[in-house]
Image (cartoon, rainbow, N blue to C red):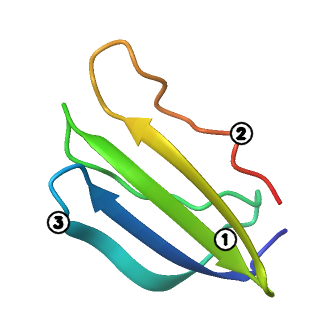
Amino acid sequence: MVEEEFIVFIEDSEGNIIVDETMTSLENGFIDFWLPRDRTYLVRIEHEGRMVESEISTFDDDATCITTMQF
């Protein structure tokens, strides 16, 4: 899904909204964003009526590239 628009919503475990905007995927099909360390987040991505949601975290041993959120 190269250079497609996605609605991205990211909220931390305390209910703070970190991202709530439309983003365009890059030439490689990924969406790139940085999140503060040592927190847990709910990430929801919507595209053309489809939605994927996942909990991710940014602690020391967590992955820095999430590739499992797919439509």
**Residue 17 x/y as whole percent:** 24, 71
**Residue 1 x/y as whole percent:** 84, 68
Label ID, residue 68: 2
Three-letter amino acid code of the residue under disc 3: Asn
Q: Is residue 29 left or right of residue 23?
A: right
Q: Residue furthest top?
A: 61
Point 81% across, 70% down: residue: 2
**Residue 58 x/y as whole percent:** 31, 32
Callout 2 secondary element: loop
Q: Are marks 2 and 3 in contact (CB under 8 Å)?
A: no
Measure the C-alpha gap from mark 2 to mark 1: 15 Å
Above or below — where is 31 with respect to 58?
below
Structural crowding at the residue carrying mark 1, measured as other residues with C-alpha within 10 Å and reported as few (<14), some (14–19) or many (≥20): some
Q: Mark 3 = which residue?
A: 16
Callout 3 secondary element: loop
Q: Is residue 10 left or right of residue 5?
A: left
Measure the C-alpha gap from mark 1 to mark 3: 24 Å
Q: Nearer the observer, disc 2 or disc 3?
A: 3
Above or below — where is 54 with respect to 65?
below
Three-letter amino acid code of the residue under disc 2: Thr
Q: Are marks 2 and 1 in contact (CB under 8 Å)?
A: no
Q: Mark 1 = which residue?
A: 25
Report which quarter residue 50 is drawn in: bottom right
Three-letter amino acid code of the residue under disc 1: Ser
Point 43% across, 85% down: residue: 21
29 or 52: which is nearer to us? 52
Q: Nearer the observer, disc 1 or disc 3?
A: 3
**Residue 46 x/y as whole percent:** 66, 76
Q: Quadrant of the C terminus?
A: bottom right
Point 29% across, 50% down: residue: 35
